[in-house]
Image (cartoon, rainbow, N blue to C red):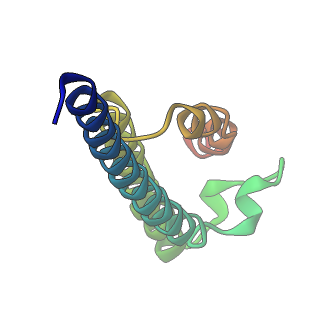
């Protein structure tokens, strides 16, 4: 094998390895995003729909409802911290992270905090 063939073959092998590594990382990211989406949905489904209404009054809830809201609020904040940590580790795709930053739960939780 001559130098040109060796260089071409080496370039092909390197390209193939980089392609495999990129694919593997993309699959991990997709699995991570799917897991996070399911977990997010599970948390959000435990909040009462009335929480989004402007006349929502936390004090009018019974103790069990208050406990459930607080429990899932803590779960949500834990989830956000974990997402942020994954973002810092560059395990969440940049475009996905931009969408996550645009979520409007800040208003949602401001209602809970003000209650």
Q: Is residue 108 left or right of residue 80?
A: right
- Quadrant of residue 85 in the image? top left
When the figure is inspected, residue 63 is found, relative to residue 79, above or below; the finding is below
State the residue at coordinates (66%, 63%).
Answer: 60
State the residue at coordinates (26%, 42%).
Answer: 13
- Quadrant of residue 80 in the image? top left
When the figure is inspected, residue 65 is found, relative to residue 24, above or below; the finding is below
User: In the image as oriented, which residue stretches furthest toward the right?
Assistant: 54
- Residue 55 location in percent, x, y? 83, 51
Q: Quadrant of the N terminus?
A: top left
- Residue 86 location in percent, x, y? 32, 40
Camera-nearest residue between 110 and 43: 43
Camera-nearest residue between 20 and 83: 20
State the residue at coordinates (62%, 55%).
Answer: 58
State the residue at coordinates (38%, 45%).
Answer: 19
Q: Quadrant of the C terminus?
A: top right
When the figure is inspected, residue 62 is found, relative to residue 15, above or below; the finding is below
Q: Is residue 9 left or right of residue 43?
A: left
- Residue 64 location in percent, x, y? 47, 76
User: In the image as oriented, which residue stretches furthest toward the front?
Assistant: 2
Camera-nearest residue between 92 and 47: 92
- Quadrant of residue 109 in the image? top right
């Amino acid at each position: 094998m001559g130098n040109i063939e060796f260089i071409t073959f080496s370039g092909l092998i390197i390209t193939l390895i980089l392609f495999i590594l990129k694919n593997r990382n993309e699959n991990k990211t997709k699995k991570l995003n799917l897991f996070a989406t399911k977990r997010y949905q599970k948390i959000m489904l435990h909040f009462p729909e009335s929480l989004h209404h402007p006349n929502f009054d936390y004090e009018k809830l019974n103790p069990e409802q208050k406990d459930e809201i607080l429990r899932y609020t803590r779960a949500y904040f834990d989830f956000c911290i974990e997402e942020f940590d994954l973002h810092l580790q560059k395990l969440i795709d940049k475009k996905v992270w931009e969408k996550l930053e645009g979520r409007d739960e800040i208003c949602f939780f401001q209602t809970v905090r003000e209650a």
